[in-house]
Image: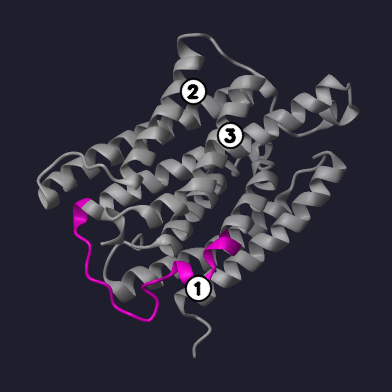
Amino acid sequence: MSWFTDRHCFLLAVITYGFSTIYSVLLWRKGFRQDNRTSYCLLLFAFVFHTMAMVQRGFSFSRCPVNNLYEAITFVAWTIVTTYLVFGIWSRLRFLGAFASPVLFGVGVFGLMPALDNAYGTRPEFINGWSSLHAALILLAYGAFGLSSAAGLMYLTQEHNLKFHKLRAIVSLMPPIQRLEIAIGRLLLAGFSLLTAGLVIGAYHLKQTHGVFYKDDAKILWSLLVWMIYLGLLLMRWSFAQTGRRFVWGAVGGFAFVLLTFWGTNLLSAIHQQ
């Protein structure tokens, strides 16, 4: 068996995410006092294997690779690392990788569970364009939410250092907490916009396939709940001027909720198992 199947390429990507996580621990201990080009290069190296895995899966099944939980995980992780690599071009934002690496590694390890890839070794039916677009937009939204959560962890770390007057908060290459808060808000807005577009397209696709715009389905109800959670966060920021630690914890907690409940609701959904 070739070591360059899509799953083996993803395995190599996860291993590299693991090395990046180990290096990130060293950065935390040093207080982020240096430009972590090594972390950026490790994530870039992992990105190459990750992209190869997605391309091979997509071409082998002739469709957008978002048909099951394994593919959903790889897509979400890919959007997170891709966005980081773009922002990481600026040296002062590369430390986002120190928080993104553990998330990518943990999600990747979970995604390697064989039971999640129920299409492995078979050729599933082609998914039409509307369904693929719906899934892609929503998974891109989760990627933006994941990055906002990573930025939130950066914010909380920097705030903790400032609160206890630690020198590393002054000499750190981390962005100021005010700039981090702005970045979190913009990432949440981008993710919410993508999520809204994905849900609208999903409702249109549901109308085409089932004759209704809404069904009492576990995944649909969960998606609406996630939409309301992030709408609430944005309203807190805009209408009630809720900023600072409470807002950041909301961003971190919102993505934690998505990670912990996504897989279970997907398995309970009759529509998404078809």
Q: Quadrant of residue 243?
A: top right
Whole-percent x and y of residue 160? Answer: 80, 26
* Structural crowding at the residue carrying mark 3, measured as other residues with C-alpha within 10 Å and reported as few (<14), some (14–19) or many (≥20): some
Q: Secondary structure at mark 3?
A: helix
The answer to whether residue 111 is above or below residue 12 is above
Alpha carbon separation for disc pair 3 and 2:
11 Å
| x 67%, y 40%: residue | 91
Which residue is located at x 80 percent, y 40 percent? 32
**Sequence-wise, which precedes: disc 2 or disc 1?**
1
Residue 129: in magenta span? yes
- What element does badge 1 sit on? helix
Report the residue marked by disc 3. 253
Given the image, on which type of amino acid does mark 3 rest? Gly
Q: Which residue is mark 2?
A: 233
Magenta segment range?
108-130
Tag 1: Cα neighbours inside 10 Å, few (<14), some, or many (≥20)? few
Quarter of the image containing the C terminus? bottom left
Name the residue at 22% across, 42% down. Answer: 215
Residue 114: mark: 1
Give neighbour class at mark 2: few <14, some 14-19, many 20+ (Cα, 10 Å).
many
The amino acid on which the numbered mark 2 sits, given as a three-letter code, is: Leu
Q: Which numbered marker is on residue 62?
A: none
Front residue of 108/59: it is 108
SS class of the residue under badge 2? helix
Where does residue 114 sit, x and y in percent of width and height?
50, 73
| Residue 268, image x, y percentages | 37, 54
In the rendered structure, which amino acid carries the disc numbered 1?
Answer: Pro
Residue 213 image point, x, y percent: 16, 39
With respect to residue 248, does 52 lie above or below? below
Left or right: 91 as drawn, with respect to 13: right
Q: Is residue 222 left or right of residue 273?
A: right
- Is-magenta flag for residue 97? no
